Image (tube, rainbow, N blue to C red):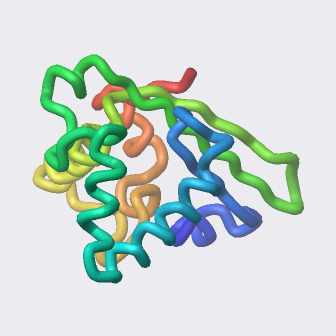
Amino acid sequence: MLFLPADFPTLDSVTVYNGWFPALARPIAAMSAITAAATRIPLGRKVLDVLTRPMIGPPSGPDAAERARTRSHVVAVASSDAAPPAEVHVEGPSAYSLTGELMAWAAQHLATTPPRTAGVVGPVEAFGFDTLRDGCAEIGLTPV
């Protein structure tokens, strides 16, 4: 939500999560904080590696074949005092590939077209809403 207030001044909050386990979004965030603290304790990282390796696989992440089989489902809920909450669901490339695909699209676009606004700005301000939406569609991110 860092860049959204300039584009949508009445927006109060945005909650975004990967749609795999929406009910676990907050507990997973808490668990992340706990595991980050545990890695600072001697042997903490080794203990966490032993406990989590069966659940998460190798540290390199999934290979190209696995990423091709897996799709992401992202949910965003926006709310403001001026309107009822709005919810959007999109599906697209694997969560492991999605950021890379978006960064590659942005780099290719910027190589041929200057940004609407220079400097540290959000994607809507840099590209414009329609261009960003079209770019997301180009990489396979589609509403569901």
Q: Position of residue 59 (x, y in %)?
A: 18, 49
Residue 132 occupies quadrant: top left
- Can you say whether 78 is above or below 117 in the image? above
Q: Position of residue 90 (x, y in %)?
A: 52, 30
Residue 69 occupies quadrant: top left
Q: Is residue 103 left or right of residue 141?
A: left
Identify the residue shown where x is 70% and y is 51%. 78
Identify the residue shown where x is 36% and y is 62%. 126
Residue 71 occupies quadrant: top left
Q: How many marks?
A: 0
In depth, the one of 123 and 93 nearer the eye is 93
Identify the residue shown where x is 59% and y is 71%. 6
In depth, the one of 43 and 72 nearer the eye is 43
In depth, the one of 13 and 73 nearer the eye is 73
Image quarter in which the N terminus is found: bottom right
In depth, the one of 43 and 105 nearer the eye is 43
Q: Position of residue 23 (x, y in %)?
A: 68, 42
Identify the residue shown where x is 32% and y is 29%. 93
